[in-house]
Structure formats: structure tokens, C-alpha cells
Amino acid sequence: MKNRVALIALSLALFSAAFSISTPANDDDDHGGRKTKRVLLISIDGMHAVDYENCVASKTCPHLAALGKTGVHYTRTSASKPSDSFPGLMAIVSGGSPRTVGAFYDVAYDRVLAPPKVATGNGLPGGICNVNQINGTQTEYEEGNEFDQSKLNGGFAGYSAIDGGVKSIDPDRLIRDPFNNCQPVYSWNFVRTNTIFGVIHHAGGYTAWSDKHAGYASVSGPTGTNQPSNVDDFYSPEVNSLQSVLPGLKTASGFDCGTLIPNGDDWTTDFDAIKCNDQLKVNAVLNQIHSRTHLGTSKAPVPVIFGMNFQAVSVGQKLIHPKSAIRTDANSGGYEDAQGTPRPKMLAEIQFVDAAIGQMIAALKHEDLFNSTTIIITAKHGQSPVDPNRFFPIPGHSGNNGTPPSGIIGSFLPAIYSDPNNGLGLAEDDISQIWLADSTRTADAVAALENVAAEFGGGQIYYGASLNTIFNPPGVPEHPGPCCKLREGGDPRTPDIVVIPNVGVVYTGNLKKQSEHGGFAWDDTNVMLLVSNPNMDARTVDSFVETTQVAPTILKLLGLDPGALDAVRLEGTPVLPALFKDREQDN
């Protein structure tokens, strides 16, 4: 027995040594002798590679330009497919695609799990959970899971008015696992693979992240509990809450959020309001750099991995405000032309983000942390179309441009989609992901679409063999087991059909929208990617890379094993090229 205890103790010690936070002993991996001790990870949602090129060339982004002078810039980076925020975020932090991670969209479908106990804030109806049986339900991981999505703090009474986090998640509004006594499935347990936050946390590193929904604590990766314990400091001022005046808060570009005049809608519906919401997260990062928690109320270690997501550029690309069928420079963000020249309102969003990053750089320098921090800037997704002349909404502002795929094959869909109380609808933006009530009828549903291709904007249809080259084969697993590991047989989350319409087609009738994301188009997926450290030589890399490569690269920079990530092992995700002098491309 003593020998067994000794062996266990030795094994634990070796494991701890192998995964403790360290820096590479070899200076060839060391960027000139100054070791990376922490990584600041920033997602500027919607930021294309061309947006970065244009703002640097026009000298409107001095801070991003300065980072580029000591960084590696990747011009042909692909975000996840689908290019939605949920799979996009998980790709960056896990190193995996939806087939491995299991995240296909904020709103998707699972053929095994059961509905929430009560209706979500966005209208996914509550329902029955049949224990130890295959159920099937639409899934939702966004603001609708919170106690009160109209409030910045998600409705948790214990938070201050400007706070936000996982305590705002109402477990009764979460989908449930029938093979785990119908327990609620939190977003971090819904995903199938671990993340950089889990690896770094388990190695003794302090971790932090700020994002737009409480459910995006999914960055923790699975914990098996109702807490995302791999993220030590998580902050989520709800972006889809109602706008409110924020006295004393000023954005990096100088707007006084105490003068904001709320329009009765959420933060994404006003060009200044979204800057205020983002600035709350910027201030959280600044507090963390200064060895405080996100609101600055308590002392804390400077995180080893931390960062945030910006929404300002994404809103600047999409928004027409005041809403109108006619876009002008006075009421519209977006672009002037196919080369990505931003209209004034969108340019102001980019300049705000640049100024906010400047605040972070200044804080790092003030704390003498800049040289030992590697800054990685990318995006969960792009936005389509860049060319304003390509925008074609279906059904359109007047409702006569056509019919989305869901409207054409509605009779093939699960009953939840015909429930009059369901306010979610299908996962249709500039993509349509379709889960059928009976997968054996996939060919019939596709034939119905093919017969009226012009109605839904043509494009490309993936199903069967063509779909299986991208995702796991769809279906019900033979052995469902507990949530949410992939079992033998079909993948319960893979859609039966994916429709990618012609470039510029967006499934919307919304007068305030002029672009969207989610699809596979170049404008959706070609995002900026910059890795910067003062000891790096400037370089531009034009070979194709993916945002999934960010995760293993972060671990390698910190002296940890990229192979500690589940998705890296399963998919063979390499580190980013041109960063390490030994040119390692293995894991």
C-alpha cells in the first residue's frame, strides 16, 4: 500500500512539474531573451484583415500600427465555420472546430438534450425532460439564459449596476441533460473540449476574461459543476440589455457615457452606446493590469491569460441608425466600396477600439509589464458583405425579396420551430443551418430547396458527404451517455443541411441591419490576426492560417504543451508559423 501511495505521489509531482507555468529555457523560443509571462488576448469582432490594413495605411490606428512594428501580421486568417460568435470564440480558446468542440451557433439544436424548465428570455419554450431518454431541443447560449436580460448585470441582485457574470444565469432557463437526471447544462459544460483557460489555470496561472454574455464563460471549458472554475475573474456586462446612463464613464475616444440618451433598445443599436458597453470591459482589463479584480474593488494577481471582446466594430459594420431602407453617411456605418473604405461612423468605431488598446498598452508600460506581455489581436468573425452594393436582404425590407430556407421547408423541421411561443427562430443570418425532424428525409428537403433556389438566394447547399467533410455525420448517437461527449453513431448537434447563399444575401427584414455574419464567405471568415511583443521582428505572413491556431500558440508562448488541449490532439492543430526561431510546426 505504501508503495502505491508513493507512486501516486510521484505521478502527481511529475504531472505538476510538466504543466506548471514556466518559460522556455531555449532562447531560440524566447523573442530575444525576454520571456512571455502573460498573454493579452483581444477579439475585435468583425475586424477583417483588410480593416487592419486600411486603418494602418491611413494612419487612423496609431496603436495598432505600433503593435504591428513589433509583431507578426497574418493576412489570410480564417475564423471558424460557421462564423458565429460562439464557435468563433471557442475556436480561439480551444484550438478546435465545431465538429470537435460541439458549438455550432449561439442558437442551434441538440437531438439528445431536453428543453429548459421554463421559457428563456428570448422565447425558447420550457418543456418536459424525459429521464434517460433521447429528447431533442433547440439550444440557446446567449442573453436569454439570464434572470433579466434587460439589465446590464443580467438581473442578479447581488451585482452592482455595472457588474455582470455567471451569477446572472438562471439555471431554469438552461437546456437539460436527460442522462444526468435532467440537470441544467451550463455553457462551459456544453462544450466538449478543454481550453487554454483550463490548461493555464490547472498549471497554477491566474486567468481572466470579459465578454458580452454571461454564457460566454464557456471559455472555461468543462468543469462538471455549475461554476466555470477555470476562469478566476469573469466579467460580462450584458450587451443586449437596455441602454442606461453611465455617469463617470468616458470612452477611450472621449465620449461621456453620462450624457448618453438611451433609445429604449439595447447597446448594439447606437454608435455611441456600444462604445460605452465596450469601455466597461476595457476598464476591467485595465484594472487587471493594475493587479485588481475587474471592477477594481479587490487586489488580485495580474492574469497569465486575460482579455476581452470588442463589439464596436461589428456594430459599426452592421448598423443603420436611425433605421431606414436608405443608407447614407449620416445614418449608416459599414463601408463605402468593395475595397473596405469605412464610412465615418464605422471609422469612429475602429478609432475607439484603437484608442482603447492604447489605454491597455499604456497601463502595461506603467506597470513595467509591456515587454513580458505578448498581445494577440484577432476576431471571432468578420462581417458580410463588405461591398455595400452586394447587400440583398431576404425577405427584405419590403418583404418581397424571397423566402429564407426555413420558410421553404418548414414542414421538415422539428415541432419546436412551429411552436408559436418560440421566439428564437432558426439559425439564419447569412447562413442557414437546418436540423430536420427526420434525418432520413434530408434528400427530400434538399430537393425542395433546389427547386426554388432563387427564392433563398441560391449559393451552395451542404448535406450528406459534402457536409461530412466539414462536420461529423449528423444523427442520434447509439449510446447517448451523459452530456456532452460525442458517442458512437451520429453527432446530435451537426445540422442535416447547411445553406450558404450568394455573397451579400442576409436573411433579415430588419431596417437597421446592412450586413451579418455566420456564413463561410471570405468577408465572414477573413479576420485580422496580429501577434505582437516588443522583442519580435515585424513580419507579414501570407500563408493560410486559422484562428484555431491561436490557442496552441498561446500555450507554447507560455512554455506549456499545446498538446494539453483536447482539440489540438484530435484535430492536429499546429501553432502559428513564423513566431518561433526553431520554426516548430508540431504540437
Image (tube, rainbow, N blue to C red):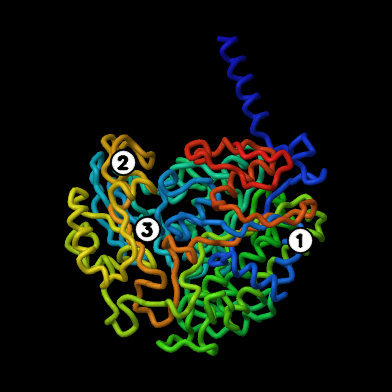
Residue that badge 2 annotates: 181
> Residue flagged by tag 1: what amino acid is it?
Lys
Q: Is residue 119 above or below residue 258?
A: above
- The residue shown at (50%, 38%) is 566
Q: Nearer the viewer, residue 529 or 205?
A: 529
Q: CA distance from mark 2 to mark 3?
A: 20 Å
What secondary structure is found at the residue carrying circle 1? Answer: loop
- The residue shown at (57%, 72%) is 312
Q: Earlier in the sequence, mark 2 or mark 3?
A: 3
- The residue shown at (61%, 42%) is 201
What secondary structure is found at the residue carrying circle 3? Answer: strand
> Residue flagged by tag 2: what amino acid is it?
Asn
Mark linked to residue 161: none
Q: Nearer the viewer, residue 333 or 118?
A: 333
Residue that badge 3 annotates: 140
- In the rendered view of the protein, which quadrant contains the C terminus? top right
- Comparing labels 2 and 3, the label whose residue is closer to the camera: 3
Q: Is residue 560 left or right of residue 421?
A: right
Q: Is residue 41 left or right of residue 488?
A: right
Q: CA distance from mark 1 to mark 3?
A: 41 Å
Residue that badge 1 annotates: 69
Q: Earlier in the sequence, mark 1 or mark 3?
A: 1
> Residue flagged by tag 3: what amino acid is it?
Glu
Q: Is residue 478 above or below residue 422?
A: above
- In the rendered view of the protein, which quadrant contains the N terminus? top right
Residue 501: x, y in percent?
A: 35, 66
Q: Nearer the viewer, residue 313 or 402?
A: 402
